Image (cartoon, rainbow, N blue to C red):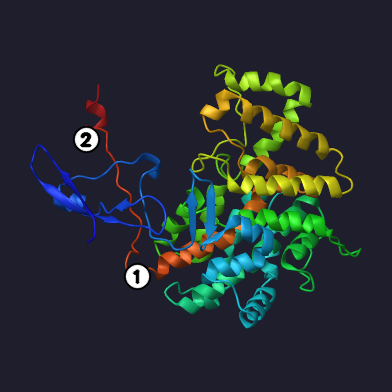
Amino acid sequence: MSKTLTLTDNDTGRSAELPVLEPTYGTPVVDISGVPREIGCFTHDPGYGATSACRSWVTYIDGDQGILLYRGYPIEQLAEKSSFLEVCYLLIYGELPGAAEWVEFEADIRKHTMVHEGLRTIITGYRRGSHPMAMMVGLVGALSGFYHDALDVNDPAHRLACIHRLVAKMPTIAADTHKWGAGQPFMHPDNSYGFVENFMRMMFGVPAEPFEVDPVAARALELMMILHADHEQNASTSTVRLCGSSGTNPYAAIAAGIATLWGPAHGGANEAVVQMLSEIGGRGDIPKFIDRVKDRESGVRLMGFGHRVYKSYDPRASIIRNACHDLLSKLEGTEREQPMFESALELERIARSDDYFIERNLYPNVDFYSGIILSALGFPLNMFTVIFAVARTVGWITQWNEMLGDTEDFRIGRPRQLYLGHARRDYVPAEERS
């Protein structure tokens, strides 16, 4: 028998029987859609922290236990055994690919890695010093102006074509924003490289010289992208769903997600970690820094610790910590990053042994180490959030596609509000106002 919860208005005596929906994992969800009709009021939930806005079969997070699953697969297993492109297939289609499916998918992604040359004309209209995320918002939104053949969001085949195009083209667009800012020529994709290797070549290669990809560096970047591919109903994913619920084209919806990700409280956190570690100085300065963090009057924050969802250790953080250690010990030319990594380790050790941080569940999150990895790989600070966007695009577009395909629950997003403004009042002509 299905469970229900009874909600009663003690003043009017009106009540509603609310269905309790049971998930595969996690907290049961009370369906409150009948509350306005049965009782005559809405619920109030600032930040939507206690609201389930959709049904989803894609990603599951248990913040208390530190669990992250993509389509049921633990992130630890995917990070160890899979590739980013295979994770893309898993998220999009719900299952790992068979041999024939993999060949077809990989070939289709390769077919779409180039971008229309008109898009590069748009890039040249930006100032050289423009932030790459500013360009990403505009360029991804502009894709709908170049690819008109598959924009019917009610056609599953059109949606799938858009999904493949976005996954394939995002590394090219991201690399182009970097090249424009660096004053270097754009690099066309070379599909003889793997997906991640091709991205690194477009970022750091030049037409005049051959480009060799360090496998340790490529694996570190691939791991970063796997860990960032999806993360349930966060701010940017919710934005993509809300934007897409109006029926807009997927390129506009993804551009909205990129704009949301740009915020320092979301995608810009790894930039803040690198800035913090740079400002701390050496390991000997860390205790003094910790004291300033504890002093609320100082305004100093410990970046890269704690998470809105994870109340224990972020499962991605331990994976990326090991990758960071491997990268810095094997790559040449990263001497300037080694002190930063050592400071990060010491900061983590002190914070995790200090009651002040333990009581507040301030464990290292994925951003704590990801910025160090990106810096060691040679990515400039202003590209950190762009890399995040490249990886997260597959999660965004998968969630968008899932929403449109859910014929039972799909409807345009329309949150309610608690209005606290003026009561009705009448207009007074200007000459009569005191």
Q: Give the residue at x 53% y 74%.
A: 160
The tag on residue 407 is 1
Quarter of the image for residue 305 reads top right
Quarter of the image for residue 203 reads bottom right
Q: Which element is circle 2 on?
A: loop
Of tags 1 and 2, the one toward the viewer is 1
Residue linked to disc 2: 427
Q: Is the N terminus in the top left, top right, bottom left or bottom right quadrant?
A: bottom left
Q: Give the residue at x 64% y 48%.
A: 385
Is 3 situated above or below 347? below
Amino acid found under the numbered disc labelled 1: Thr
Tell me which numbered mark, 1 or 2, is placed earlier along the sequence: 1
Residue 146 visible, this orientation: no
Residue 116 visible, this orientation: yes
Between residues 298 and 3, which one lies in front from this camera angle? 3
Is 365 situated above or below 359? below
